[in-house]
Image: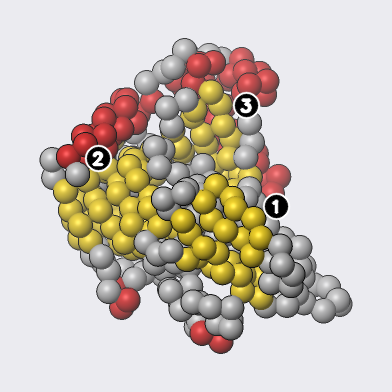
Amino acid sequence: MNVVSYRPRPEELSYTFGGRPAVGRITPGTILEIYTEDCFGGRVRGPEDLPSQVCEFPYLNPVTGPFHVEGAEPGDTIALHFVSIEPARDWAVSTTFPHFGALTTTHTTAMLHPPLDEVVWMYDVDVEKGVVRYHARRGDFSVEMPLDPMHGTVGVAPAAFESRMTITPDAHGGNMDTPELRAGVTLYLGVNVEGGLFSVGDGHCRQGHGEVCGTAVEAAMNTVVAVELVKGVATPWPRLEDDDHLMATGSARPLEDAYRISQHDLVTWTASLTGLDTLDAYQLVSQGGEAPVGNVVDTNYTMVAKLPKAYLGRPEAYESAHARLRALGERYLTSR
């Protein structure tokens, strides 16, 4: 088993997909152990650390990478199986911003009412108990919620020399902010440039669907990823697979276009896997599918289309990459 560990120094963190060289080269079949910093670069450490004062735009939402996958070429797909995602600290943070989030005025939704206050919430992270603890800032209320670690931002370099800020989700992946991207899930990303150049970041201890206030329970993570390359198979939009579901994503504005992209990709993917006529696949997805919301706050919004594999006869997607990577991840965990 080939295991590679990488912990970036602060100056090695990336803030774009594309536009920078790889920090390492990965052979397909490798287990990659990485550290990812939170979306504030670890600078928000208490209620008085307002992001507008301790962070510098555009140095937000750092990712670890990019990693060059040996043999990856445009038209291929990189499969990333998230073996484990574990909080690296016993605290995490969330905020509201004056002009960011789903329920406030923004630069594209101009309003005359005052902007929201900039407020920081600190969460206790109890890995042993499997919870995060919310504490109200303007009252005595407190509650425990289940720990559900995920990565909000994962992607590859875009095509045609393009460089995209990490806060933007699109066909290359990026800041999709879907809670579906947790341990046990395989993410499929279409390769646009030689090596693919994938990066991972934006860990969340948990997040509600939509990331309504603009931030999740933001945390640094120690993450293990199993990497594989599927040659000659293209992936138009990021796709996910767990033991029981196939999922397709779409990122755009307005939200209904993100919804349409994700549903279109799931319908056509279903048709290709089963041999169904497109309209037959459309009918099946319409009655058996789910539509979890990723984010409604970023520069593009993200929707997910989700369908149980049992309805499809459990087809072998991407040459059974998920099953192979899951088995590889289990061998890694057993060997620890």
What residue appears at the point 55 percent right and 64 percent down from the top-left corner?
Answer: 123
Quarter of the image that includes the N terminus: top left
Is disc 1 surrounded by few (<14), some (14 to 19) or many (20+) residues within 10 Å? few
Is disc 2 surrounded by few (<14), some (14 to 19) or many (20+) residues within 10 Å? few
Residue type at mark 1 is Pro
Q: Position of residue 18 (x, y in %)?
A: 37, 63
**Left or right of 178, for residue 41:** left
Residue 82's label in the rendered image is none
Q: CA distance from mark 2 to mark 3?
A: 32 Å
Residue 289's label in the rendered image is 3
What residue appears at the point 68 percent right and 57 percent down from the top-left corner?
Answer: 212
- The one of 289 and 140 positioned closer to us in this rendering: 140
Mark nearer the N terminus (1 vs 3): 1
Q: Secondary structure at mark 2?
A: helix
Q: CA distance from mark 2 to mark 1?
A: 41 Å
Image: 273 above or below 155: above
Mark nearer the N terminus (2 vs 3): 3
Residue 333's label in the rendered image is 2
- The one of 146 and 70 positioned closer to us in this rendering: 146
Residue type at mark 3 is Gly
Which residue carries the number 1 mark? 254
Callout 2–callout 3 Cβ contact below 8 Å = no
Q: Position of residue 148 (x, y in %)?
A: 50, 47
Quarter of the image that includes the C terminus: top left
Image: 226 above or below 116: above
Q: CA distance from mark 1 to mark 3?
A: 21 Å
Q: Position of residue 279 (x, y in %)?
A: 63, 18
**Outermost residue toward the right in this view:** 112
Residue type at mark 2 is Leu
What residue appears at the point 52 percent right and 51 percent down from the top-left corner?
Answer: 131
